[in-house]
Amino acid sequence: MKEIIVRVACCISIILIVMASGCVAPPKENATSTKNGNPFNPNQPGGTQTTQTPSYVTEVTPFVTVTPTSEFRTIPPTPLPGDLYCRIYSTTNIDNTTAIAFNLQNPPMYINYTVKPSNITEKRVVTEWEGEGQSMREVEKVLTIDTYSPNSRYIIKVLSKSTGEIYLEDGFGTRQYTTYLNRTLKISNRDNLQIEFKGINITAKANVWVKPEGNFDDPTQFNTTTDCAYFGPRPRNELPFATATPTPTWNG
């Protein structure tokens, strides 16, 4: 009887051991592992590797960039109007010469002018080819050209009234001067100036502009609405610039 009881106890023990070995819980996924690779081998596809944060930096939360919903328009800055200059002299020269003197204490001075040269009619002989193939031949034709007279000149000269030193000599016509119909000249010499305007076979108009401050004891004597204008730091016509270049008329 005891032998039977011992056998039954042994069988029960074996059954319990087998059941215990078959009910082991499946391993849980580790937070540092991935499905497709070894977490400790960065050379294996899909693997990841955790780098330890150095001790000399501190991990922080990145800033969140917020995109504005409203639309902003960039307003260009208002350009500076430049300095105020007032006209102290105007002249019209039709084949004549005028001159003035002015003590320029606060330069610069600006002189702008417009010219209308005399027109002339020229006849020029040109050679053209007519016909086709072996029948082509040279034919001389006479063209009638309306253009400016090469004798039209306008000369502006600025010099020291006391010494006669020439500070500026410029104008329209000939190879010595330009062929621009509109110009603005700049004089930067602080001196008692003599300014001469000479027109030859031409009609020209000129204006002289200076700053009222520093050149007059009472700058308020000018009507800023009609007698004054703003000149920028570098007027467009300070350098030679053709605002209206003459174009000859060709007549066949």
Image: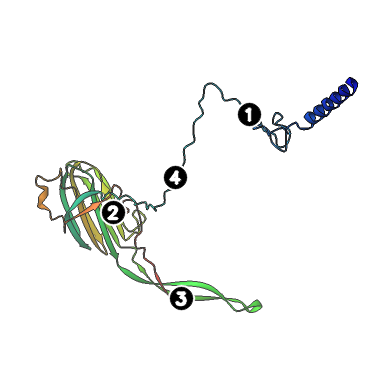
Q: Amino acid at mark 2?
A: Thr
Report the amino acid beneath label 3: Val
Of the 4 image quadrants, the one containing the C terminus is bottom left
What distance separates the C-alpha of mark 4 from that of mark 3? 77 Å
Q: Earlier in the sequence, mark 3 or mark 2?
A: 3
Element class at badge 3: strand
Asked if labels 2 and 3 touch by Cβ distance under 8 angstroms, the answer is no
Q: CA distance from mark 3 to mark 2?
A: 39 Å
Gap in angstroms between the C-alphas marked 4 and 2: 54 Å
Residue holding disc 3 = 142
The mark nearer the N terminus, 4 or 1, is 1
Q: Residue extending furthest front? A: 1
Residue closest to the eye, 39 or 22: 22
Tag of residue 184: 2
Position of 228 relative to 15 (above/below): below
Which residue is depicted at the point 42% across and 49% down? Answer: 68
Q: CA distance from mark 3 to mark 1?
A: 94 Å
Residue on which the image places disc 1: 50
Q: Secondary structure at mark 1?
A: loop
Q: Position of residue 46 (x, y in %)?
A: 70, 37
The local crowd at label 3, few if under 14, some if 14 to 19, many if 20 or more residues have their Cα within 10 Å, is few
Answer yes or no: do the residues labelled 3 and 1 have beta carbons within 8 Å? no
Q: Earlier in the sequence, mark 3 or mark 1?
A: 1
Find disc 4 in the rendering and name its residue: 66
First in sequence, mark 2 or 1: give its number.
1
How packed mark 2 is, by other alpha carbons closer than 10 Å (few <14, some 14-19, many 20 or more), is many
- Residue 26, given in percent of the width and then of the height, sits at 73, 34
In the rendered view, does 126 fall on the left or right side of 231?
right
Question: In which quarter of the view is residue 183 placed?
Answer: bottom left
**Amino acid type indicated by mark 1:** Thr
* Residue 246 falls in image quadrant: bottom left
